[in-house]
Image (tube, grey):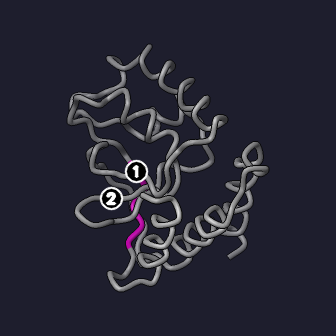
């Protein structure tokens, strides 16, 4: 429990530059992230196609968009050397290029996946690898199909008008 709270604290501190822009949707997002980490029935590392993952929220704040632009530039400089023979970008490669306290984290969602951690990194990767079948190492959190978390995600999507 303490480990999870520390991870949540680190995540929240990482978002400090965006605190002045927080809204009710951000509070619901934080609740969803915490609930996913608490209620997951299984956590495993796997590789999934980059374009099978959607973002849990739109990225539209200037500070976040500026960070994505920096990541896109860094990725474009090394795109050709990143992908291994099996067309998978490893978590180790991501950490080297885009350091973070956690890997990109996803849940099964509809016919694919939804990221709830690492959205900016994912968006940058999707821009750079837009025309490929590249896969990405991620941490997959499994939830019961009837989990209330999916209803909370639907509420969040409505709040963002997605």
Magenta includes 121? no
Q: Which residues are drawn in magenta? A: 138-142
Q: Going 36% across and 26% down the picture, which residue do you hit?
A: 128
Q: Going 52% across and 54% down the picture, which residue do you hit?
A: 117
- Mark pair 2, 1: CA separation: 11 Å
Q: Going 64% across and 61% down the picture, which residue do you hit?
A: 26
Q: Looking at the picture, how far across and down is residue 57, in whole percent?
A: 50, 55
Q: Going 76% across and 42% down the picture, which residue do you hit?
A: 17
Image quarter of residue 145? bottom left
* Classed neighbour count for the residue bearing mark 1: other residues with Cα under 10 Å, few (<14), some (14–19), many (≥20): many
The residue identified by callout 1 is 138
The residue identified by callout 2 is 113
Q: Looking at the picture, how far across and down is residue 118, in whole percent?
A: 52, 47
Q: Is residue 33 left or right of residue 85?
A: right
Label 2 vs 1, first from the N-terminus: 2
Q: Looking at the picture, how far across and down is residue 48, in whole percent?
A: 28, 49
Q: Is residue 7 left or right of residue 105?
A: right
Residue depth check, mark 2 versus mark 1: number of the one nearer the observer: 2
Q: In this view, does 15 lie to the left or right of 97?
A: right
Q: Which of 24 and 37 is in front in this view?
A: 24
Q: Nearer the viewer, residue 18 or 1?
A: 18
């Amino acid at each position: 429990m303490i480990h999870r709270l520390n991870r949540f604290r680190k995540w929240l501190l990482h978002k400090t530059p965006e605190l002045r822009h927080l809204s009710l949707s951000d509070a619901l997002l934080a609740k969803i992230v915490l609930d996913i980490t608490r209620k997951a029935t299984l956590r495993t590392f796997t590789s999934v196609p980059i374009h099978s993952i959607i973002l849990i929220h739109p990225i539209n704040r200037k500070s976040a968009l500026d960070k994505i632009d920096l990541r896109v530039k860094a990725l474009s400089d090394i795109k050709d050397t990143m992908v291994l023979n099996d067309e998978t970008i490893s978590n180790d490669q991501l950490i080297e290029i885009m350091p973070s306290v956690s890997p990109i984290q996803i849940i099964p969602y509809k016919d694919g996946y939804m990221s709830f951690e690492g959205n900016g990194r994912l968006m940058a990767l999707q821009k750079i690898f837009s025309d490929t079948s590249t896969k990405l190492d991620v941490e997959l959190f499994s939830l019961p199909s009837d989990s209330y978390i999916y209803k909370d995600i639907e509420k969040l999507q409505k709040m963002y008008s997605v």
